[in-house]
Amino acid sequence: MTDQTPVLRLEGIVKTFPGVRALDGVSFDVRPGEVHALMGENGAGKSTLMKVLGGIHAPNEGQIFIGEEPVIVTSPKQAKAKGVVFIHQELSLADELTVAENIFLGELPLKSFGRVDWGKLYDDTNAILKTLNVGFDAKTRVGDLSIANQQMVEIGRALTVSPRAVIFDEPTASLTDAEKVVLFEVIAGLQAKGVGIIYISHRMEEIFKITDRISVLRDGQYRGTVNTADTNEDEVTKLMIGRSLDLSRSPVTHELGEVALEAQGLSCGDLFEDVSFKLHKGEVLGFYGLVGAGRTEIAETIFGLRTPSAGKILLNGQEVRISSPIDAVRQGISLVPEDRKDQGLVLGMNCRDNMTLPQVDDLTAGPFVSDGAEIAIFDQYRDKLDIRTPGWRQTVGNLSGGNQQKIVIGKWLSMRPDVLIVDEPTRGIDVGSKSEIHNLIRELAAQGYAVIVISSEMPEVLRVSDRIVAMFNGHVMREFTSEEVTEDNLIQAISGLSDAAA
């Protein structure tokens, strides 16, 4: 096999489901030692293509080649045995087992009479962990690790074999900037060994930082491959969605209203301290800071999920006490949480029932919930938010990430809140849906909603916010208007290099 012979190639892959042609003759390859990005909107076919590669779905047409050998893959275990390993966005670890047991699950080294060779297990695991440069060892209980370190355990699983190709699916979704550096070093180490990397991500800055080539799917079809060094974000976006995006923020053309929400010296233990801000009707107030800065904890306190240790919360000028989310909703506050799958949706329920879940008690007719009232609410917000689904009966877990997020937003908008808090509004969402969510947030402000946006993405918070609260280590460092904020002074503030008096 020559250096340019792909380590992995998919040729003319077709996959159909009842009524849907999910993949339509897709071809894709990855060369030894390259990082090859696979991009496309949610629903473009990326996940289906990877499930075909992993043996979860059998293709209707087409062929998989590993090296120059045509293969039929019938399970992820068989794919791994042939040197193709997946690092999934959704963790699949056993919390009660050790790191070693998780990494070698199903492949534990054995001695005579089927006994586990614990010494070899721990030695082999610690050798893998050393290459990952992590701060825990083989005997650590996985449930005691952070999400980021649990993801490193997932990566460790890939290194139990000598992989020919490793597929990373949104690998940085839960990582801090420092942890991303470690991940990229791991990827570079795999490249140096001639391993081919398939990198699936919606984060353009990462794609242009670490990849060699970019392939794009749209509507289940292959739209082209470009060298990363020879293209730019706009060209890739056009391939993904068929058009350019205007990522600039329109200037505010409406008058801001009265103060809808105010925090005065709000504290919550050692999570955040002495936080004060005002939010006006018709305004988007952004909260930006590093992981652990206290942004989400402030939202959870306002929404009644945490009890403040000091300070006041005022709604429309009146002090309120919020001891639970029920109190918050009754006071006119809604929260779109950062993890829509675990905190915002019931994935096995249909779209209508998810949309109306918080107000089901108000939609009863005698002992039964009024189907007509629920459907009317769903139809209203499906049209308002342009939710793309065949109908209300569709299971939410089958929707794209962008449409799932719109369901969560619609659920809380249907409660007609005075204050809407949106935490990480576009996490795991493709660039087209991201632009739609951004435009929606701006439109809600124009309609008079008071909106708080919490984001770990600087371009996002710069685009949607009228003012930005910069946080560091549980403290407000500085507040910026959209006119005075720059990337440099925002980075200084969230790094603790600028104070509120700056």
Image (cartoon, helix red, strand yellow):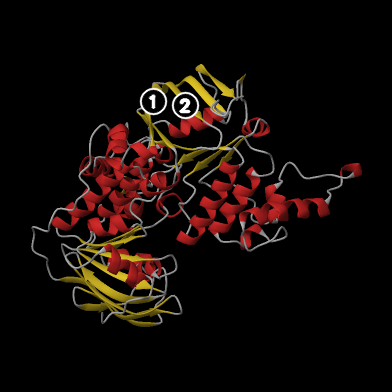
Against 444, residue 329 (above or below) is below
Quote the CA–CA distance across marks 1 and 2. 8 Å
Location of residue 396 in the rendering, given as x and y in whole percent from the top left corner: 40, 40
Residue visible at 54% across and 57% down in the picture: 147
Which mark is drawn over residue 393?
none
**Dot 2: what SS?**
strand
Q: Give whichever of discs 1 and 2 has the lower sequence position.
A: 2
Q: Nearer the viewer, residue 282 or 38?
A: 38
Q: Is residue 29 shown to the viewer in this render?
A: yes
Identified by mark 1, the residue type is Tyr
> In the displayed image of the protein, which residue is found farthest to the top?
61
Q: Are marks 1 and 2 in contact (CB under 8 Å)?
A: yes
Dot 1, how many residues are within 10 Å of its Cα: few (below 14), some (14-19), or many (20+)?
A: many
Q: Residue at x 44, y 49 (%)?
A: 341
* 276 vs 152, nearest the viewer: 152
Relative to 482, does residue 406 appear above or below in the rendering? above
Q: Is residue 333 above or below residue 396?
A: below
Looking at this view, name the residue that lies furthest to the right: 112
**Residue 473: percent from the left, percent from the top?**
42, 74
**Image quadrant occupied by the N terminus:** top right
For residue 265, above or below residue 399: below
Looking at the rendered structure, the kind of residue marked 2 is Phe
Q: Residue at x 31, y 66 (%)?
A: 287
Q: Position of residue 66 (x, y in %)?
A: 60, 25
Residue position marked by numbered label 1 in the rendering: 222
Please tell me which residue lies in front, 128 or 173.
Answer: 128
Helix, strand or loop at mark 1: strand
Residue for badge 2: 28
Q: Does residue 368 appear in the picture of this structure?
A: no
Q: Is 215 or 328 nearer to us in this picture?
A: 215
| Residue that appears at 44% across and 38% down | 212
Residue 109 at x, y = what percent? Answer: 80, 45
